[in-house]
Image (cartoon, grey):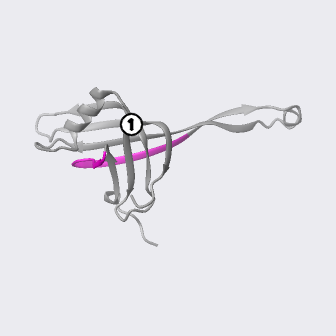
Amino acid sequence: MDYRDGTDLILSVGGGALGHSTECKIGYKAETGSRKTKEAAAGKWDEKYVKSLGVTITASGFVYDGDTTGLPSMEAIFLAHVPVVCTWAYRDGTNAHTGKFILTQLNQTGKAGDDEQYDITLENSGAVDDAPGA
């Protein structure tokens, strides 16, 4: 069995691979509701259904002078406050997904003696689909 290396998961935000990234996490969630029918109530079991689906992306990276796809572009996207297209896939193009996302959080950290870093959180705005050939 082959295991994938974390560096094989590539996130693109606004058409460019996220610059100098160190970490990427894709979270899928389903908001559920429950209904209880008379038949189900007799057995004490709730019936669940999906109300909505969501995807949250968190990523981190190093701040690098001259970088056009890292912190400077994330600042511009945040200040524009409009959805941006995000795509993620493995380096070989498999398991690719795409959708519009809103940059909901941008953190910039500069500790004395350490490299400056940034963290972002993106939340989907609409459907997330397969992206064949991404």
Q: Quadrant of residue 7?
A: bottom left
Q: Is residue 23 magenta?
A: yes
For the view shown, which residue lies furthest in the bottom direction? 1
Is 3 on the left-hand or right-hand side of 47? left
Q: Which residues are magenta?
A: 15-29
Q: Nearer the viewer, residue 90 or 5?
A: 90
Residue drawn at x 22%, y 32% as measured from the top left: 108
Q: Is residue 24 magenta?
A: yes
Circle 1 residue: 122
Can you give x and y, in whole percent of width and height, for residue 102 in the image?
39, 33
Is 39 on the left-hand or right-hand side of 65? right
Can you give x and y, in whole percent of width and height, for residue 39 in the image?
89, 36
Amino acid beneath label 1:
Leu
Residue drawn at x 29%, y 30% as measured from the top left: 78
Can you give x and y, in whole percent of width and height, for residue 89 in the image?
39, 56
Q: How many marks?
A: 1
> How would you classify the magenta stretch by its main secondary structure?
strand
Q: Quadrant of residue 93?
A: bottom left
Residue drawn at x 76%, y 32% as measured from the top left: 35
Q: In the picture, which quadrant includes the C terminus?
A: bottom left
Under circle 1, the secondary element is strand
Can you give x and y, in whole percent of width and height, for residue 111 in the image?
16, 34
Q: Nearer the viewer, residue 120 or 2?
A: 120
